[in-house]
Image: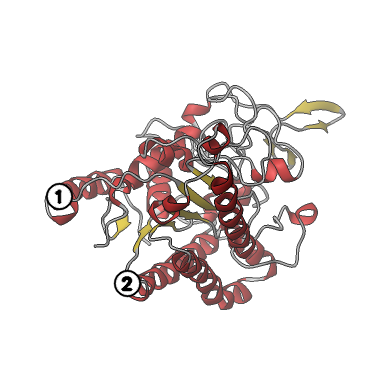
């Protein structure tokens, strides 16, 4: 994938604005009653924090002013999706305290993969809740909330439950695949490349299952430029081997694998559109948005996009965001920077709220989707 400039993104938006005067532009807003999200830490709003060790400060400090189950200083892209659709932020399925599922649920957990992995969260941070398990949880959620709603209908208890008839009208969102690449790179590039068809087919199987359960509107994110995550640059020698980094200073081989994953995912989503005759299936090019942000960071008001806001990372000493450690005998706290809004990367793996908002703004208007579809019209099959 070539470099996408800010001018290209703006031109794409203007082109979409002209095109939207056609059939898509005439379509009525969908008024989704709920969102059901499946994914990893890029869209987890409290799942892994509820299931294992709670996420601690300074996570959440910018918007929520306290830890909020999110791997960021504030809101994630899925939160901006909820805002755009005028819905509340999603409660995590695994969070039993104070949850409200009237307008959907979030099955994403940090560290989740599409394929089940032979690793544990205590080894490499891989969640036991792979995509197939998230789908099982959705099935259980749908069955149990439907049964409970029919028992308590007309009482205050029903106010926190989804309406059974609204499952078919909801938006089903996916943001997952980054950790499949992470696991694959540990095993080796050849093995990872050979696994890509099965990975994208398993995601397609999840979509098809939800379709069989009545889902009709699907919003599927591809994966971002993996080699541009600062964590992948922490241990690169200085100077790096010739050809190891690309024109943005990111790990070239990892970015190339991200592009290949996205190519296969897009092809599979196109086939899904043919297979699911009554579904609106939208492929969302998050990669283009994030690549554009990294390439044009300074012009967009961001600092070096490969630098980290939270944590202590100096030469070979690494203390992760919110943790304490010793450097040369002195205790160091991996605190946050003064102004997260000018950083793209929060902790080396996850984006800041400011970056997530920028990505959301670029993708939700439909200029980076296939077919070109604003998220407010994602129920319409084009």
User: Which residue is at the front of the view, 378 or 125?
Assistant: 378
User: Which residue is at the front of the view, 272 or 286?
Assistant: 272
Element under disc 2? loop
Q: Earlier in the sequence, mark 2 or mark 1?
A: 1
Counting labels gives: 2
Answer left or right for 96 relative to 161. right
Bin the neighbour count of mark 2 within 10 Å (Cα to Cα): few under 14, some 14-19, many 20 and up.
few
Q: Is residue 357 above or below residue 228?
A: above
Q: Pick out the residue farthest to the bottom.
A: 194
Question: What residue is drawn where x is 32% and y is 43%?
Answer: 31
Bin the neighbour count of mark 1 within 10 Å (Cα to Cα): few under 14, some 14-19, many 20 and up.
few
Question: What residue is drawn where x is 56% and y is 57%?
Answer: 178
Q: Which residue is mark 2?
A: 277
Residue 15 in sight in this render: no
Residue 112 is situated, as x and y percent measured from the top left of the image, at 63, 56
Point out which mark residue 79 bears: none
Question: What residue is drawn where x is 59% and y is 22%?
Answer: 65
Q: Which residue is mark 1?
A: 26
User: Which residue is at the front of the view, 228 or 103?
Assistant: 103
Q: CA distance from mark 2 to mark 1?
A: 22 Å
Residue 253 is situated, as x and y percent measured from the top left of the image, at 53, 64
Element under disc 1? helix
Residue 255 is situated, as x and y percent measured from the top left of the image, at 50, 60
Location of the C terminus (image quadrant) = bottom left
Answer left or right for 170 relative to 196. left
Check whether the beta carbons of the residues at disc 2 and disc 1 lie within 8 A of each other: no
Residue 173 in sight in this render: yes
């Amino acid at each position: 994938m070539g470099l996408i400039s800010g001018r290209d993104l703006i031109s794409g938006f203007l082109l979409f604005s002209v095109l939207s005067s056609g059939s898509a532009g005439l379509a009525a807003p969908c008024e989704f009653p709920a969102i059901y999200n499946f994914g990893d830490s890029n869209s987890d709003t409290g799942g892994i924090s509820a299931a294992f060790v709670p996420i601690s400060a300074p996570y959440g400090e910018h918007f929520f002013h306290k830890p909020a189950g999110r791997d960021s200083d504030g809101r994630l892209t899925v939160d901006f999706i909820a805002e755009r659709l005028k819905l509340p932020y999603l409660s995590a399925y695994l969070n039993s305290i104070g949850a409200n599922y009237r307008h959907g649920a979030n099955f994403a957990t940090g560290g989740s993969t599409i394929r089940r992995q032979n690793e544990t969260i205590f080894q490499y941070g891989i969640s036991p809740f792979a995509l197939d398990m998230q789908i099982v949880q959705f099935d259980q959620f749908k069955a149990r909330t439907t049964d409970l709603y029919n028992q308590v209908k007309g009482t205050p208890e029903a106010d926190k439950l989804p309406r059974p008839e609204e499952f078919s009208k909801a938006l089903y969102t996916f943001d997952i695949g980054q950790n499949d690449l992470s696991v694959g790179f540990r095993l080796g590039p050849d093995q990872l490349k050979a696994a890509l068809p099965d990975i994208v087919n398993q995601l397609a199987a999840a979509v098809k299952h939800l379709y069989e359960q009545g889902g009709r509107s699907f919003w599927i994110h591809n994966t971002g430029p993996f080699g541009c995550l600062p964590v992948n640059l922490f241990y690169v020698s200085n100077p790096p081997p010739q050809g190891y980094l690309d024109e943005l200073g990111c790990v070239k081989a990892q970015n190339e694998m991200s592009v290949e994953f996205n190519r296969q995912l897009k092809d599979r989503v196109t086939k899904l559109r043919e297979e699911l005759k009554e579904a609106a299936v939208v492929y969302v090019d998050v990669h283009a948005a994030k690549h554009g942000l990294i390439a044009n960071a300074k012009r967009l008001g961001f600092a070096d996009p490969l630098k980290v806001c939270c944590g202590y990372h100096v030469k070979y000493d690494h203390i992760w965001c919110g943790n304490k450690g010793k450097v040369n005998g002195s205790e160091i706290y991996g605190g946050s920077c003064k102004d997260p809004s000018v950083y793209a990367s929060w902790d080396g793996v996850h984006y800041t709220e400011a970056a997530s908002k920028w990505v959301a703004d670029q993708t939700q208007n439909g200029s980076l989707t296939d077919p070109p579809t604003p998220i407010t019209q994602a129920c319409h099959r084009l």
